[in-house]
Image (tube, helix red, strand yellow):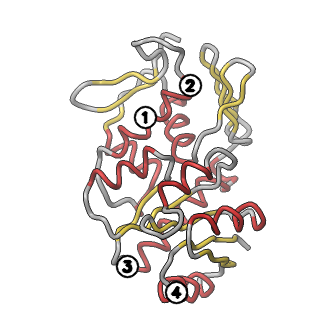
């Protein structure tokens, strides 16, 4: 049974989410703010975190910064903010997805299932290791290394790299990539893929102005270099 940590300062929201999540077969733990959520996450080790952004004591942004220093647990943001810039900021901080309030519970459950499937579904992770230059991607173990150094990627970053690296030289539009890493549950801005690529490059690319691995195709999207 998968464990989901629900982080929201509103009791009624946590109660509502607990009801639907438990009916869907998940184990639910709760926190009322970011500071409490850090302690709960360390103790319970959830499989996924549903995180409200606007909270007292420690908000969702501060939580994300602290959480990703010690864990790669996937995070879905729950936010009442509807500005695209707010959602992109959350993705820049390492969130795997976002859902704006008020949300449809069936959509939220689909997003949860999609992220968990990408993280744990063995049917997609055959015994396969991809290599290019100094970069190694172990599909089954969901491990990425640059040289001998392991790199911590979010589930979305890992799936993005896997998609690109599996077919070097192939051009993908932003929408193609979003559909591949988010599936049918995706509903949002194509620009979110740019945030994931920027975060991914910061972790895997050698220093320098020109990316070696993930190349931009202006006006379309991205491809993995066929020359590495």
In this rendering, would 168 be left or right of 216?
right
Image mark for residue 197? 1
Residues at badges 2 and 4 in contact (C-beta under 8 Å)?
no
Q: Position of residue 21 (x, y in %)?
A: 58, 81
Task: Say which residue label 2 marks.
Answer: 204
Residues at badges 1 and 3 in contact (C-beta under 8 Å)?
no
Task: Say which residue label 3 marks.
Answer: 104
Query: Marks 1 and 3, how far apart in space?
Result: 28 Å
Q: Position of residue 211 (x, y in %)?
A: 43, 17
Q: Is residue 134 above or below residue 155?
A: above
Q: Who's the residue at 69% across and 78% down the image?
A: 27
Q: Who's the residue at 54% across and 15% down the image?
A: 206
Q: Position of residue 93 (x, y in %)?
A: 48, 46
Q: Based on the displayed image, in which of its 4 quarters is residue 140 positioned?
A: top right
Q: Residue furthest right?
A: 43
Q: Earlier in the sequence, mark 4 or mark 1?
A: 4
SS category of the residue bearing label 4: helix
Residues at badges 2 and 3 in contact (C-beta under 8 Å)?
no
Task: Say which residue label 4 marks.
Answer: 11
Would you call the spot at circle 3 few (<14 residues within 10 Å), some (14-19), or many (20 or more)? few
Q: Is residue 199 above or below residue 191?
A: above
Query: Marks 2 and 3, how far apart in space?
Result: 36 Å
In this rendering, would 117 be left or right of 227?
right
Q: Earlier in the sequence, mark 1 or mark 2?
A: 1
SS category of the residue bearing label 1: helix
Residues at badges 1 and 2 in contact (C-beta under 8 Å)?
no
Would you call the spot at circle 1 few (<14 residues within 10 Å), some (14-19), or many (20 or more)? many
Query: Marks 2 and 4, how far apart in space?
Result: 40 Å
Q: How many marks?
A: 4
In this rendering, would 218 be left or right of 118?
left
């Amino acid at each position: 049974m998968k464990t989901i940590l629900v982080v929201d300062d509103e009791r009624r929201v946590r109660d509502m989410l607990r009801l639907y999540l438990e009916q869907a077969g998940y184990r639910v733990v709760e926190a009322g703010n970011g500071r409490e959520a850090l302690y709960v996450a360390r103790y319970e080790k959830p499989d996924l975190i549903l995180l409200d952004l606007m909270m007292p004591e420690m908000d969702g942004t501060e939580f994300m910064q602290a959480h990703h220093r010690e864990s790669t647990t996937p995070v879905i943001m729950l936010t009442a903010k509807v500005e695209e810039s707010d959602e992109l900021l959350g993705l820049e901080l390492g969130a795997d997805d976002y859902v704006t309030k008020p949300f449809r519970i069936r959509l939220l459950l689909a997003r949860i299932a999609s992220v968990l499937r990408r993280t744990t579904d063995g049917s997609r992770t055959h015994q396969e290791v991809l290599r290019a230059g100094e970069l190694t991607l172990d599909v089954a173990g969901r491990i990425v290394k640059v040289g001998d150094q392991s790199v911590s990627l979010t589930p979305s970053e890992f799936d993005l790299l896997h998609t690109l690296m599996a077919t070097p030289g192939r051009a993908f539009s932003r929408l193609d990539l979003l559909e591949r890493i988010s599936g049918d549950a995706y509903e949002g801005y194509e620009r979110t893929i740019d945030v994931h690529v920027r975060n991914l490059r910061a972790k895997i690319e050698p220093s320098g102005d020109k990316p070696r691995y993930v190349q931009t195709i202006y006006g379309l999207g991205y491809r993995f270099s066929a020359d590495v």
